[in-house]
């Protein structure tokens, strides 16, 4: 995914909820005449597209991204694989699951939402067949 300018305030984004139960699944972040589908904690899920395309991306993903593995850039030299423990429009808490990172396994990191490029989604969930 390429680096792009995204409005940094969730308050400026458009909520996107599941049609059947009204659960918040993410946001649409306007960028010019395009929209970036964002998680509930403000991480980009896909490249910018028209509004319908961004809504479709959120509908297709639902909240499944909460079960995925993510990569956290801890500092300039250290990155680690993490899983989401808690997520909201205010913050996300992730837990280190990378034995090879040199960090304590299970260590938790709390990040204020919206997250920046420090937290990125891995392409494949390792629990998938």
Image: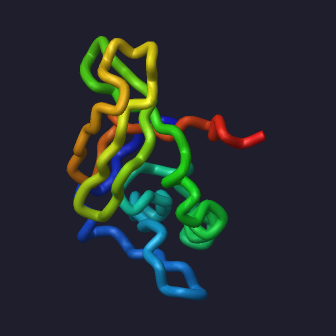
Colour option used: rainbow
On screen, residue 75 versus residue 126, left or right, reads left
**Does residue 104 show up?**
yes
Quadrant containing the C terminus is top right
The residue positioned 61% from the left and 70% from the top of the image is 59
Residue 36: x and y in percent read: 47, 57
Q: Is residue 68 above or below residue 72?
A: below
* Nearest the eye: 103 or 125: 103
The residue positioned 58% from the left and 85% from the top of the image is 19
Quadrant position of residue 54? bottom right
Residue 111: x and y in percent read: 24, 45
Q: Is residue 14 above or below residue 98?
A: below
On screen, residue 40 versus residue 25, left or right, reads left
Q: Is residue 52 above or below residue 20?
A: above
Residue 98: x and y in percent read: 45, 23
Q: In the displayed image of the protein, which residue is found farthest to the right? A: 129
The residue positioned 49% from the left and 60% from the top of the image is 37
* Nearest the eye: 41 or 46: 41
Residue 110: x and y in percent read: 23, 44
The residue positioned 61% from the left and 60% from the top of the image is 61
**Does residue 124 show up?**
no
On screen, residue 119 versus residue 61, left or right, reads left
* Nearest the eye: 9 or 24: 24
């Amino acid at each position: 995914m390429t680096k792009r300018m995204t409005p940094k305030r969730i308050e400026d984004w458009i909520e996107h909820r599941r049609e059947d139960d009204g659960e918040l699944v993410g946001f649409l972040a306007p960028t010019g005449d395009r929209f970036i589908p964002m998680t509930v904690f403000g991480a980009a899920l896909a490249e910018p597209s028209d509004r319908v395309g961004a809504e479709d991306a959120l509908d297709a993903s639902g909240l499944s991204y909460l079960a995925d593995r993510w990569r956290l850039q801890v500092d300039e030299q250290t990155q680690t694989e993490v899983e989401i423990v808690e997520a909201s429009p205010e913050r996300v808490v992730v837990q280190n699951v990378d034995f090879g990172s040199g960090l304590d396994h299970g260590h938790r990191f709390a990040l204020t939402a919206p997250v920046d490029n420090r937290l990125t989604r891995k392409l494949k969930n390792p629990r998938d067949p």
